[in-house]
Amino acid sequence: MDLGIALQLALITAIAFVCQWAAWRIKLPAILPLLLSGIAIGPLLGLLDPNEMFGDLLLPGVSLAVAIILFEGAMTLKLDEIKGLETTVRRLVTWGALITWAVITTAAVYIVEMEFELALLFGALVTVTGPTVIVPLLRSVRPVASVSRLLRWEGIVIDPLGALLAVLAYELIVVAGGPAGGIGHSLWLFLQTIFLGAAVGLVAAWALAELLKRHLVPEFLRSFLVLSAVVAQFVVSNELKEESGLVAVTVCGMVLTNWRGVRTEDILHFKENLSVILISGLFIVLAARLRMEEIAALGGVALLMLCVVQFIARPLSVIVSTAGSSLNWREKALLSWVAPRGIVAAAISALFAERLAQQPGAPEGVATLVPLTFMMIIGTVSLQSLTARALAKRLDVAEPAPRGVFIVGANPVARAIGTALQKYGYPVLLSDSSWEMIRSARMAGLGTFYGNPVSAYADQSLDLVGLGRLMGLSQRRELNALATMRYRLEFGEQNVYSLASPTDSDEKHTVAPEHRGGTLFSADLTYGKLASALSKGAEIKRTKLTEEFTFDSYMATSERQIWPLFAIDTRERLHVFTEEVQPRLGAGWQIISLVLEEDNPDKKETATESARALSA
């Protein structure tokens, strides 16, 4: 079936979105459904032919897309995150990569019966892991911080290094031909590529940092500037020395994000969105170029190679790289299991296979290079996605599910709500710049962070492990709004909330809804009203609903005022009452409410105590 180019583009876009959404729902890396979809609409159904669709623009477009993806990944590498683990990272991307390369190359020679030079190229390609698969996998596995940081740093740093190893192997095949002099020449070209790419990346990072620090570019053009610079330095570096562009963009991203005084959060957000689009399209397009007969011809060879990669190469690499480190055996075991292959392996294999096919006297077996690489990608991602979370739990190196709540403010209202949540099994962390408030929260047994939640100190020191929501309960509405804006990406837009303020009915003085998150509880339940109710003896109580005792029955109870705050469903998940969204309640659910008994003399003593607490 022949589809027009516009229809093929629309098909790629629609399938890419569905795959990303499905991966988010089932908590698996999107690469797996993307690859399978690409194979389905390409070689199986014949709906998409990338070579015919893009022509000569296909491989240059793939190269540019990979450069942008690597730059975005490099911008997530903060040097302060890796303190104490620098040696392990360095070993993983040097000795670990060389060990992996050697093991896979040897296996390719004896199992796949590749020629040695081609096996070297395949081994280099399968050495890389990559952020496109590591980051989504880490979101679902949630390993301890040390393992998570190591895997992320390794995946991003090793991508360009693995590509350079592939360049070295390619030079051995095409230029040097394998003799001793040829190997020396190839190593010299390899070093030239690294140093030239690093130099271009450093110059580009310096130029961008100066432009951004001096505010020479308006806010709405900052992301456009950086994107243009990434493309320009990649192309210029490649023109100066072929394949050095990946090194340039990686170095530029790492340096720029760690440059003091340069704000990159908005740029990173833009690049993340762009990377998701590029990754989705790339995997579908590259998978659609495969041929079913090439995949079928591999037979059990692909399975044997997967076993070598998963059970020999990776564990051996980790054992050597982590020797003498502070990691315990459980963390090392998880590191030895998680190493999925990603977009760089797919893209570079397609690029070099195309070039080799056009070379006279190309080694036999070039046709198996791309399908075998893709089988390694599909195999490692499938196996590790299905097993890594269970293994992390079994080894006791998985972080707890993000059930907790980060509360901005440690005032009496925040302490009362925090105490109730903690009492019912939901961890809390209260943040405040007032030592008196923090001290009172600590005396109540609550987790605390002494400092401003949107400060640079908080960025470096705040531990959000196990926390999945933010609630702005500060008396300072501007701080609530800043916090919801700052942590919107951290927790997700649907999981940040702040209290309504008394001026929310006046547009001139109201923080825009998109900056303050969901309105906690209801639009008329301000800090002052909550504090007043607590001072009168109101208490936060939990009530269970049944078929007979519904939510409407509960709210209709006379002689008391009730303000619903939270709901707990039958699976112990916490739901927040907001002005915008009300939980769909049913039998078995529990309601956590602020309850004020009316005209009850027994509450006078409680009210007095609450008033004293509030004055403190």
Image (spheres, rainbow, N blue to C red):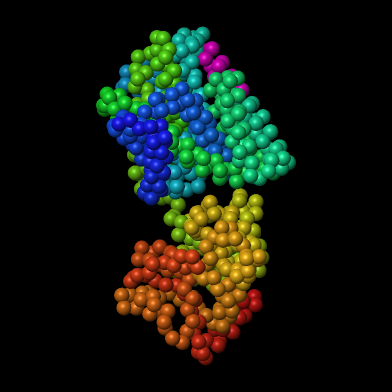
The quarter of the picture where residue 271 lies is top right
Magenta: predominant secondary structure element? helix
Residue 572 drawn above or below residue 142 = below
User: Does 217 sit left or right of 24 as displayed?
Assistant: right
Q: Nearer the viewer, residue 71 or 122?
A: 71
The residue under the point 53% across, 12% down is 184
Quarter of the image where the N terminus is located: top left
Residue 406 drawn above or below residue 182 = below
- Residue 240, position as x, y percentages in the image: 60, 19
The residue under the point 35% across, 14% down is 364
- Residue 487, position as x, y percentages in the image: 56, 54
Quarter of the image where the C terminus is located: bottom right
- Residue 35, position as x, y percentages in the image: 36, 35
User: Does 52 sit left or right of 68 as displayed?
Assistant: left
Which residues are drawn in magenta? 184-196
Q: Nearer the viewer, residue 336 or 287?
A: 287
Residue 536 appears in the rendering: yes
Decide whether residue 186 is among the magenta residues. Answer: yes
The residue under the point 46% across, 8% down is 179
